[in-house]
Image (cartoon, grey):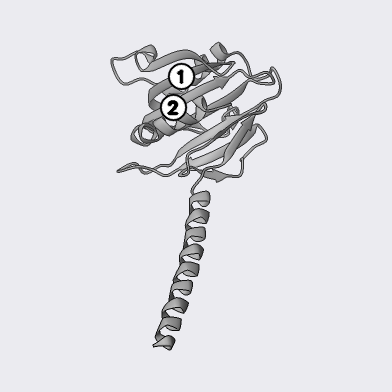
Amino acid sequence: MRSAHVLLLAGGIVALCLGSVQSGAGQEKQKEKKGAVVKLDGLESRVPADWQEEPPTNRTRVKQFRLSPIADDKDNAEVIIFYFGEGQGGSAEDNIKRWKGFFVPPEGKKIDDVAKVEKMKVGDVPVTYLDIHGTYSFRFPPFDPQAKTTLRPNYRMLGVVFESKKGPYFVRIIGPADTVAFYKKGFDEWIKGFK
């Protein structure tokens, strides 16, 4: 009888230890599911966990993320943060105009029919936000006049000019329209979350 109690007690201790180990493993998995923290001029905000960070492909890119395609979309969406230097890169208006120039509106529409511009503040930072869709004229490298242009129909871009003290920073998510629509809520929450 006494050995049965000892076995029960030992079994309980093992179960408690295993539960504690599993709980610790669960907490580690929760930590792993958090997205990267992005810092801009001392402000920071965490990206959604499903954004996959990639090494920047050129020196003007501070960060870039790949977002997996949704439903029937074939291409990834991409989030890119550009920085050209303090006070460099042009005004918000210049960039909005340039970004609109990347798109061809659907037949019978003008570019301003498919583009919405909003001004807001994130904390004390003035932000200009463009939401545009249509056929995207993809050119890489973008500033090379000899680069080949590929037309990508049914694309969408959310472009942000983030005018912080040492900015501006230029943030874009671009990809197939349905994929960008899927990630838009997380993108908006991330932008508005900078503190």
The residue drawn where x is 47% and y is 57% is: 26
User: Mark 1 and mark 2: span between their CA atoms?
Assistant: 8 Å
Q: Quadrant of residue 182?
A: top left
Asked whether 96 or 7 is in front, the reply is 7
Element assignment for label 2: strand
In which quadrant will I find the C terminus?
A: top right
Asked whether 8 or 143 is in front, the reply is 8
Which residue, given by chain and number where applicable, does mark 2 sit on?
157
* Residue type of the residue flagged with mark 1: Leu
Element assignment for label 1: strand
Asked whether 130 or 164 is in front, the reply is 164
Taking the image as shown, residue 128 lies to the left or right of residue 115, namely right
Point out the tag, 1 or 2, that comes first from the N-terminus.
Answer: 1
Q: What label sits on residue 130 in the rendered view? A: 1
In which quadrant will I find the N terminus?
A: bottom left
* Residue type of the residue flagged with mark 2: Met
Position in image of residue 88 (x %, y %): 68, 19
Q: Could one spot residue 175 in this view of the protein?
A: no
- Answer above or below: position of 27 versus 89: below
Q: What label sits on residue 103 in the rendered view? A: none
The residue drawn where x is 41% and y is 79% is: 8
Task: Report crowding for label 2: few under 14, some 14 to 19, many 20 or more residues within 10 A (C-alpha).
Answer: many
The residue drawn where x is 40% and y is 35% is: 183
The residue drawn where x is 45% and y is 25% is: 158
Position in image of residue 89 (x %, y %): 64, 20
Q: Could one spot residue 78 in this view of the protein?
A: yes
Position in image of residue 114 (x %, y %): 36, 17
Task: Report crowding for label 1: few under 14, some 14 to 19, many 20 or more residues within 10 A (C-alpha).
Answer: many
Evaluate if marks 1 and 2 touch, with contact meaning CB atoms under 8 Å apart: yes
Position in image of residue 140 (x %, y %): 55, 34
Q: Quadrant of residue 134?
A: top left
